[in-house]
Amino acid sequence: MLARSANGLFWMSRYLERAEHTARLLITQFEAMEDRSVEEIDLSWRRIYLAMGRSPAGGDLTS
């Protein structure tokens, strides 16, 4: 019983840490959006989506 609880706490902390890193990445991205062209912003968001293993919902800017 104790091992199962410890295992659950371990994975919960891993997911919490992952969420914290994702939030930090998004905050940095939002702060860096000032004074950048639309193309640079699009490219940086694509990099974030790629790092997260996702694809953007809106499609490509050039299409």
Image (spheres, rainbow, N blue to C red):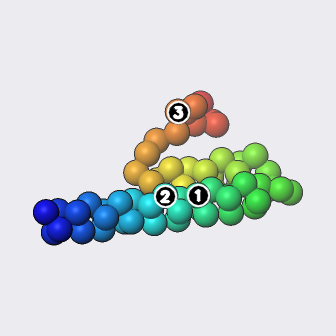
Q: Residue at x 58, y 58 (%)?
A: 23
Nearer to us in this view, 24 or 54:
24
Nearer to us in this view, 40 or 7:
7
Q: Quadrant of residue 60?
A: top right
Amino acid found under the numbered disc labelled 2: Ala
Q: Is residue 8 left or right of residue 3?
A: right
Q: Residues within 10 Å of mark 3 (few under 14, many from 20)?
A: few
In the rendered image, residue 59, in percent from the top left (x then y), is placed at 55, 33
Q: CA distance from mark 3 to mark 2?
A: 21 Å
Q: Dot 2 lies on which element?
A: helix
Q: Dot 3 lies on which element?
A: loop
Q: Where is 63 relative to 49, above or below? A: above
In the rendered image, which residue does mark 3 sit on?
57
In the rendered image, which residue does mark 1 sit on?
23
In the rendered image, which residue does mark 2 sit on?
19
In the rendered image, residue 40, in percent from the top left (x then y), is placed at 71, 54
In the rendered image, residue 17, in percent from the top left (x then y), is placed at 45, 66
Tell how many labels. 3
- Tags 3 and 2 touching, CB below 8 Å: no
Amino acid found under the numbered disc labelled 3: Ala
- Tags 1 and 2 touching, CB below 8 Å: yes
Nearer to us in this view, 2 or 15:
2
Q: Quadrant of residue 4?
A: bottom left
Q: Residues within 10 Å of mark 2 (few under 14, many from 20)?
A: few
Residue 7 seen anywhere in this rendered image of the structure:
no
Q: CA distance from mark 1 to mark 3?
A: 19 Å
Say which label, 3 or 2, has the lower sequence index.
2
Nearer to us in this view, 18 or 13:
13
Q: Quadrant of the N terminus?
A: bottom left
Q: Residues within 10 Å of mark 1 (few under 14, many from 20)?
A: few
In the rendered image, residue 22, in percent from the top left (x then y), is placed at 53, 59
